[in-house]
Image (cartoon, helix red, strand yellow):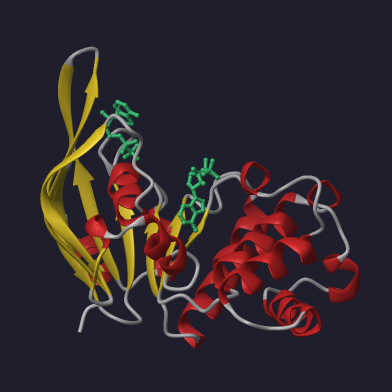
Amino acid sequence: AATLSVRNLTISYRRGGRDTVAVAGADFALAPGERLGLVGESGSGKSTLAAAVLRTLPDNARVSSGSISLGGSDILSLDAAELRRIRSTRIARVPQNPLASLNPVFTIGRQLTDIVRAHRKVSKAEAIAIAEEILGKVGLPDVAVKRRSFPHELSGGMRQRVMIAMALINRPQLLIADEPTTALDTTVQAQIVELLRERVTTARMSLLLITHDMGIVSELCTQVMVMYRGRIVEQGPVADVLTNP
Ligand code: ADP
Ligand code: ADP
């Protein structure tokens, strides 16, 4: 069974009294453990498609047709409480810019334990143990110190490791990463790609990776999907699509 199934999805934006189609009839499925690279020029609809799956579309967006199913749940019809439960437990997101998503006034440990305790009945001590375990897994040395650190005390690469920890801490089935390495320098980019590859494959998670970097797709993904002006114009195994002239 597919983790994610998107069928005939069409989304438009209303701006200045007229509608623009941003995603036109998108149709694809992602099986457990499959890693899909979503590529295409700027404005081709990649973020809109990902936002629909995350149910974070802006108010002026309208889904005019189609369906999105995640592990059997109909994403487009979930109410607010169901959405809160699904986010971070079944689907999680690694953003492009960690600083925009981290709370500057709470420690890394507090932000991790809050996510755990929002979804699991565990004591504070148990939540801290879970947070320290995941910090170790994302390769942050000196876990106890990092847990007490504030976001601004970490480097960009460390902050992105924290975002991956936050995304993974409740063991979601699907990880959506939106240009997760674009804001990092090239050495750190390679480390984050390797970390994502290692974490996603050992946990057999599904990955939807938005990027403009084909190199990252070939390192990380099993499948690739190319969007052009709202349409999926090519999709298939990485080896086929990337060698296609
Ligand atoms: P990509 O992620 O591939 O760069 P987007 O999904 O951001 O593409 O954009 C797809 C299309 O939708 C573009 O034409 C863009 O201008 C338009 N669009 C994106 N967000 C909005 C919005 N909030 N309001 C109106 N149009 C939007
Ligand atoms: P970016 O870093 O890609 O520029 P932001 O970090 O500003 O994007 O976040 C964009 C939107 O996505 C915000 O409204 C944020 O609340 C939302 N978001 C972040 N993480 C999740 C998640 N796990 N599930 C659903 N929505 C999320």
Q: Is residue 160 above or below residue 35?
A: above
Quadrant of residue 8 within the rendered picture: bottom left
Question: 214 or 130: nearer the eye?
Answer: 130
Identify the residue shown where x is 79% and y is 66%. 109
Is residue 26 something one can see in this rendering? no
Question: 14 or 168: nearer the eye?
Answer: 14
Identify the residue shown where x is 26% and y is 34%. 61
- Image coordinates for residue 1, horizontal then vertical, percent: 20, 84
Q: Is residue 83 above or below residue 127?
A: above
- Image coordinates for residue 70, horizontal then vertical, percent: 28, 70
Q: Is residue 127 above or below residue 45?
A: below
Identify the residue shown where x is 46% and y is 75%. 172
The reply, left or right, for residue 205 in relation to residue 99 is left
- Image coordinates for residue 76, horizontal then vertical, percent: 23, 56
Identify the residue shown where x is 55% and y is 76%. 170
Question: 126 or 201: nearer the eye?
Answer: 126
Question: 31 or 181: nearer the eye?
Answer: 31
Quadrant of residue 16 within the rendered picture: top left
Q: Quadrant of the C terminus?
A: bottom left
Is residue 38 something one can see in this rendering? yes
Q: Is residue 129 above or below residue 164?
A: below
